[in-house]
Amino acid sequence: MTIAKHLEHTLLKPEATVEDIMQLCSEARKYGLFGVCVNPCYVGLARHLLSDTNVKVVTVVGFPLGATFSEVKALETKMAVEAHADEIDMVMNVSAFKTGDYAAVVSDIRSVVEAASPFPVKVIIEACLLTDAEKCTACRLVAEGGAAFVKTSTGFNKGGATVDDVKLLAAEAEKYGLKVKAAGGIRDAEAAQAMLAAGAERIGTSAGHKIAAGEVVERPASVIKELLENAVDAGARTVVLELRAGGRDYIRVTDDGVGMAPEDAGVCFLRHATSKLSDERGLEAIG
C-alpha cells in the first residue's frame, strides 16, 4: 500500500471557504488519497465532489474541545452520516477524563459510535494534555466505548502528533484491537513515514497532496535516473529522453550505447531511494 492510502487530507480551519474545500477534494482525487477530513457543514459538498471516486469523506464531532453534551455529539454524528460521511472523528471529553469520570467518557464515546453505526469512529484523546499513563487508560476507554481508532490530536491545542506518542498508543491499542491515527503537525513525507513506522494506520494532515506528490514523483524520477545511468554505463554518447505528464504517463529513453539484456530491463522500474525530488518540476533537471 502506498503512503497515499494512509492519508486523510484535512482542512478544518474556521475560515475555510467553499473554494478551499473544492481544492482539497481536487487534490485528494488527483493523488488517490484515502480521504478528506472536513467540518460537518462541508460533508455534503465533499461527498458530491468525490462521488465518483473511492476517496472517503471524514468529519469531526464535538470539535475541537470535546466538551459539549453527548446528545449534541450524537446528533452531529447522525446528521453527518445522513449527509454521507464515511467516518467520524470525535473529540473525547478531556475534562471528564481528567476528573476521573471514566464512565462518562465511555458513555460519551458510545453515544457517537451508536449514532455512526455501521461507520467507524475515531476518538481524539488530545495526547499533548495527557501523561503516558493517561494515554494508556484513554485507549482502554476508547475500546470500551466501541470506537475503531484512537487519534492523537485535534491540531488545535498546544501539541500535535509525536513519534513517541504514536509508538505508545500503537502498543496499547493493539491490546484492544484498535488502530491509531496520527494528526497534528505532520507536514512532509519524512514525518508521515515516521508516524507509519511507529505504528499509525492513518495520517491526518493538511499537506496530504504534497506528501503524496513527492511519492508520485519519486517513482518516475527513479526510473528515468536508472535508465540514464544505464545508458551512460553502456557507453552512450547521445541520449534522447521523452516524457509525458512528468514521466507518469510515458517514459522513453533511446541512446547509442551497447544496450542491456532484456531480462535486466525490469530493474529500472523497481522503487529506488536515489531520487530526492520534491515536485514534478525537478524532473526537468534530469538529463
Image (cartoon, helix red, strand yellow):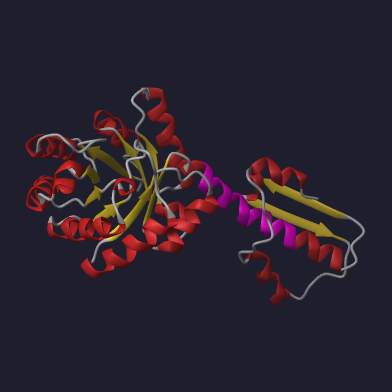
Residue at left offset 19%, top offset 50%: 119
Q: Identify which residue is drawn at 40% across, 43% down.
A: 184
Residue 279 x %, y %? 63, 43
Within the image, what quadrant is residue 42 found in?
A: top left
Task: Judge left or right: residue 200 versus residue 61.
Answer: right
Is residue 14 placed above or below 284 in the rendered structure? above
Closest to the observer: 91 or 28? 91
> Can you say whether 198 is above or below 24 in the image?
below
Q: How many marks?
A: 0
**Percent x, y of residue 206:** 44, 39
Q: Is residue 258 left or right of residue 57?
A: right
Q: Is residue 128 magenta-colored?
A: no
Q: Is residue 161 above or below residue 263?
A: above
Chain part drawn in magenta: 210-226
Q: Main secondary structure of the magenta part?
A: helix
Q: Is 218 in front, or is 96? A: 96
